[in-house]
Image (cartoon, rainbow, N blue to C red):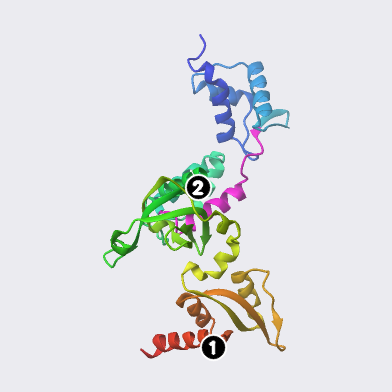
Amino acid sequence: MRGKNQKLKLLFLAKIMQEQTDDTHMLTMSQIIDELAKYDIEAQRKSVYDDLAALNFYGIEIIKYQEFGKTFYYCGARDFELAELHIIIDAIASSKFITEKKSKELIEKLEHMASNYDAKLIDRDVYVSGRVKNMNESIFYTVDAIQNAIANNHRITFQYFSWNVDKEMELKHDGKVYDISPWALLWDNENYYLLGYDNEVKDFKHYRVDKMLHTEETKDKRQGEAKFNKLDKEIYTKKHFRMFGGEEERISLLCKNEMANVIIDQFGRDVTLRKVDEEHFKVNVDVVVSNQFLSWVIALEGNVMIIGPDNVKEELKELLKKKYMD
């Protein structure tokens, strides 16, 4: 009598090969037949040969390997190599934007894309608990609503909040409902931002996605398309230092030569570094001046100095007074 799961034979065979084999763990034909039997599937060698060939044709690489007079079979190339999975999982685990709960859920799903043996290696190396993580569990619903609105060319509404000292959400501007045309999602300084066109002020603004609540797609068409098409998203991110607001200025910086790497990391390879003397270079950058930008300059301890314009130099002096004299 044939096994009750006989019609699922090919699916279970794919599961066995993907989970239990890799280039260091292989199964003989007898072992494969025994594994199928655990799922109440009866199999003959000839039919399994045909099924392995079918998996190969479908795109699941099954490699035949012979050693010491024995023939082994294992799953070869996968959608993601182990090193690639490590990179993706490390990015998820270290991301402040993704909550600890969601990080663990995503990592568990990714582990299923490796063999059981590689999944154990990955799981042993992942540390999520204790890292600074977001507390807003509705983030993924917000992202989904934004993506749908962009695809449908619709505007969205939402409320914006900040955390208070009691770790409670506090709505900004007395619970104001924002009406924004979403155009892109940006990643900067480990945070996720919505780049949207403010329909009231007729200009682009950015919003931390994890600070958005009750995000809903409307039926109203988006605004700001012409302006968005002219906007360089990469340059926008660089100018809005750490994505804080302020007035945009063209800043001249005098830097020690060893700061070249820091400047290029922050502002990109397109910046022009002009030699001043044997120890210094000068660079001009367009930046939205904020306390965050000025604090970044201060933290570099004199290795990067603002030499113009004068009003920004004065802002830096005032911030230094507040930091060290108050």
Residue in the image at 60% along x and 56% along y: 229
Q: In the picture shown, does residue 120 fall above or below 243? A: above
Identity of the residue drawn at 56% across and 44% down: 118
Q: Which residues are magenta?
A: 74-99
Q: Nearer the viewer, residue 101 or 310?
A: 310
Task: Report if residue 197 lies within the magenta region.
Answer: no
**Helix, strand or loop at disc 2?**
helix
Q: Which mark is residue 82?
A: none
Decide which of tag 2 and tag 1 comes sooner along the chain. Answer: 2
Dot label at residue 150: 2
Q: Are marks 2 and 1 in contact (CB under 8 Å)?
A: no
Considering only vertical position in the picture, is 59 above or below 104?
Answer: above
Q: Nearer the viewer, residue 313 or 141?
A: 313
Asked whether the viewer can see residue 126, the reply is no
Of 261 and 32, the residue lying toward us? 261
Callout 2 amino acid: Ile
Image coordinates for residue 52, horizontal then vertical, percent: 65, 25
Indicate left or right for 131 with 248 as reference. left
